[in-house]
Amino acid sequence: MYIAILFIAFFGLLGIGVPVAFALAGSSLVYVLVSGAVPDVVVLHRMVNGIDSFPLLAVPFFILAGNLMNSAGITNRIFGFARALVGWMRGGLGHVNVGASVVFAGMSGAAVADAGGLGTIEVKAMRDAGYDRGFSVGVTAASSTIGPIIPPSLPMVIYGVMANASIGQLFAAGFIPGLLMAVSLMVMIAWYARVRNYPRDAAFDLCVLWHATQKAFLSLMTPLIIVGGILSGMVTPTEAAIAAVFWALILGIFVYRTLTMTRLVRVSMETIETTASIMLIVAGASIFAWILTSNRVTEHFAALVLMISDNPIIILILLNVILLVAGCFLETIAAITILVPVLLPVAISIGIDPVHFGVIMVLNLMIGLLTPPIGLVLYVLAKVTNIPFDVCMRATLPFLVPLVVVLALVTFIPSLSMFVPNLVYR
């Protein structure tokens, strides 16, 4: 009965527009007050303990690194490099869009940062080259979801904390799925280009590529610092995030000289605001998850799912459906913190590695960023490009097909996720 009150309070608060962090903490407080199971001060203690985690220190630094790169003009150099590398293909700027997102994914780890930073440049360049706005926005939105799959990844950090899984292994597990997403989107772009007779951006020129590489070389070192440092074991993900911030500051202030004090203050404030919202969600979800676990709700849910079927394929399909639906209504970090305690025991019960399930969960929620009513990436693109939200939504729908295909492959072929972690860590 008391658990029913918890969920009624939670969904009721969400229904009247209360932010998800306060809905989680508020409903937990209602449960504690009504049930009298523990003193109400336990809510605060559990919330504090929920964010008292060393790996979570990586969150503000990765956010700051991504914001610094956007503000320091690093994204322009990345786009120029991608244009010289793959712009010669038919539908060239579409392929450039995906290529730039792959490179930027190795720096920021956030889909919204990709959409907000590279998105403005990419959509404008494609529109100026004669591509229709729907195609331009659809490619940009879909490619931005690669960011949290290829390491580093903010959602992977949060998942690792909630699931008590190795963040290094989670980062490694995202390599092949992220590249598969890029390849699948480029295949889709090639088909569009042939059907609509889209042009090549420019003929391949080795001299142009060399010049673009020289111009972007220091920027391209950022993924090497982050990913190489983590996989080599030289640094932890948190230390790699700090190193990325220092490198971005060096580039922005001393090398490119594009990062002024005014910009630095603005970027710092944006980072503080974003970090605070994420930490509030994690803190609120920690007490919510503790209540569910202590009342054995997670065990009962696992038993209920296994009653439906003991076939791992059926259960995996069911878990994917739950995650896809949740992604339509919940912000990524909120969805992870709420669903990991509930769904992970089910996945483990059918022999799914927690690292593999982490990739499945994050990929599902990235698709959710492209679907209404939340569709955060669509809102960001609509804002920065001045294209109506409904146009962004319709334009993105076809590009969900290759992403769902990759999701199915990653779900049912575990080696796609586990090959690199097994090679490096196990």
Image (cartoon, rainbow, N blue to C red):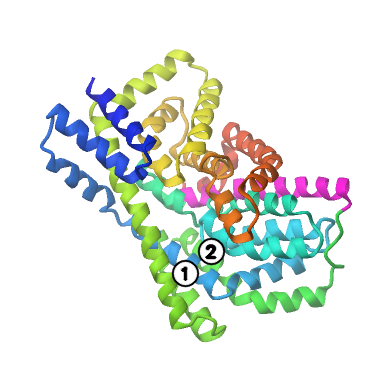
- Which span is picked out in magenta? 169-197
In this rendered view, identify the residue nearer to me: 261 or 393: 393
Q: Which amino acid type is shown beneath numbered disc 2?
A: Met
Residue 107 disc label: 2
For image coordinates 25% across by 39% down, the residue present is 26
Vertical position of residue 308 compared to residue 117: above or below: above
Q: Secondary structure at mark 1?
A: helix
Residue 130: quarter of image: bottom right
The structure residue drawn at horizontal position 67% and vertical position 47%, both measured from the top left corner, is 391
How many marks the image carries: the answer is 2
Give the percent coordinates (x, y) of residue 393. Answer: 64, 44
Choose between 19 and 396: the one closer to the eye. Answer: 19
- Please tell me whether residue 59 is drawn above or below residue 356 in the rendered image: below
Three-letter code, disc 1: Ala
Nearest the viewer among 25 and 168 is: 25
Looking at this view, is 171 or 258 the one in front? 258
The dominant secondary structure in magenta is helix
Q: CA distance from mark 2 to mark 1?
A: 8 Å
Question: Residue at 68% of width from left, 42% of height from top?
Answer: 394
Judge whether residue 179 can be spotted in this image. Answer: no
Determine if the magenta segment contains residue 269. no
Q: Which residue is mark 1?
A: 244
Q: Position of residue 150 (x, y in %)?
A: 56, 53
Q: Is residue 190 magenta?
A: yes
Q: Quadrant of the N terminus?
A: top left
Lateral position of residue 258 relative to residue 85, left or right = left
Q: Are marks 2 and 1 in contact (CB under 8 Å)?
A: yes
Indicate which disc, 2 or 1, sits on the residue closer to the N terminus. 2
**In the image, residue 361 lies at what x, y percent?**
49, 39
Residue 343 visible, this angle: yes
